[in-house]
Image: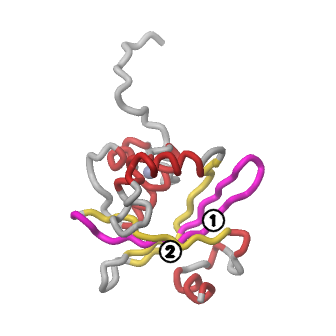
């Protein structure tokens, strides 16, 4: 089919890696491009996940809260560390397990499962991420990660409450 070629300045509407099933251009694409900011913690979490899938260090660094330890190292060092740590990692699946809207301190939380593989080894994790607003947008401030294989609970009924009980 000889169609006129458009300039390839925008990504094709392929499915977004964050597992919403939506085209990238209608999901995390505009967030990554800086055209808009995330409306809530789940949207930000998804966009950071797809940012990892796509290796978007600048976006990941930009959405870190200044209180996150990696923010101070600067973008260049962050990008180098990220490249090193994510070598060979395959992000296969994301599942949001639970979420909490901002509390009295403004901390919103998202609990998620991510299926990750490196070569043939399973590196799947469950993480409880916390997000706080800064400069008018939500940013990632901290995360507690555990290997999915070490969880006592099945993923089906894992909630933030269960997670809190198991951790302390
Ligand atoms: Zn997405």
Name the side, left or right, on which 58 lies relative to 50: left
Q: Quadrant of residue 39?
A: bottom left
Q: Quadrant of the C terminus?
A: bottom right
Residue 76: mark: none
Q: Secondary structure at mark 2?
A: strand
User: In the figure, 13 relative to 117: above or below?
Assistant: above
Which residue occupies the foreground of this view, 103 or 13? 103
User: In the figure, 97 relative to 2: above or below?
Assistant: below
**Residue drawn at 60 percent across, 85 percent down:** 167
Name the side, left or right, on which 65 lies relative to 113: left
- According to the image, label 1 marks what residue? 125
Q: Secondary structure at mark 1?
A: strand
Which residue occupies the foreground of this view, 121 or 40? 121
Mark 1 crowdedness (10 Å alpha carbons): few <14, some 14-19, many ≥20: some
User: In the figure, 30 relative to 116: above or below?
Assistant: above
Whichever of callouts 2 and 1 sits on the residue coming sooner in the sequence is 2
Residue 126 is a magenta residue:
yes
- According to the image, label 2 marks what residue? 98
**Residue drawn at 69 percent across, 76 percent down:** 151
**Residue drawn at 59 percent across, 65 percent down:** 113
Q: Is mark 2 within 8 Å of ligand 1?
A: no
Q: What number of labels is visible?
A: 2
Q: Is residue 74 visible?
A: yes
Which portion, as a residue range, is magenta?
Answer: 112-135
List the single residue furthest toward the right.
Answer: 120
**Residue drawn at 32 percent across, 43 percent down:** 33
Residue 114 is a magenta residue:
yes
Q: Position of residue 140 (x, y in %)?
A: 40, 65
Q: Position of residue 76 (x, y in %)?
A: 42, 46
Q: Is residue 27 visible?
A: no
């Amino acid at each position: 089919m000889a169609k006129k070629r458009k300039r390839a300045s925008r990504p094709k509407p392929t499915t977004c890696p964050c597992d919403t099933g939506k085209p990238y251009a209608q999901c995390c694409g505009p967030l990554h491009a800086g055209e808009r900011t995330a409306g809530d913690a789940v949207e930000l979490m998804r966009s950071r996940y797809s940012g990892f899938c796509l290796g978007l260090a600048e976006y990941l660094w930009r959405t870190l809260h200044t209180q996150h330890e990696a923010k101070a190292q600067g973008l260049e060092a962050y990008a180098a560390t990220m490249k090193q740590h994510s070598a060979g990692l395959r992000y296969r699946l994301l599942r949001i397990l639970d979420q909490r809207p901002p509390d009295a301190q403004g901390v919103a939380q998202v609990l998620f499962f991510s299926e990750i593989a490196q070569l043939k080894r399973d590196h799947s994790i469950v993480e409880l991420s916390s997000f706080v607003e800064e400069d008018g947008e939500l940013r990632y401030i901290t995360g507690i990660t555990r290997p999915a294989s070490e969880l006592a609970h099945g993923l089906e009924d894992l909630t933030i409450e269960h997670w809190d009980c198991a951790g302390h």
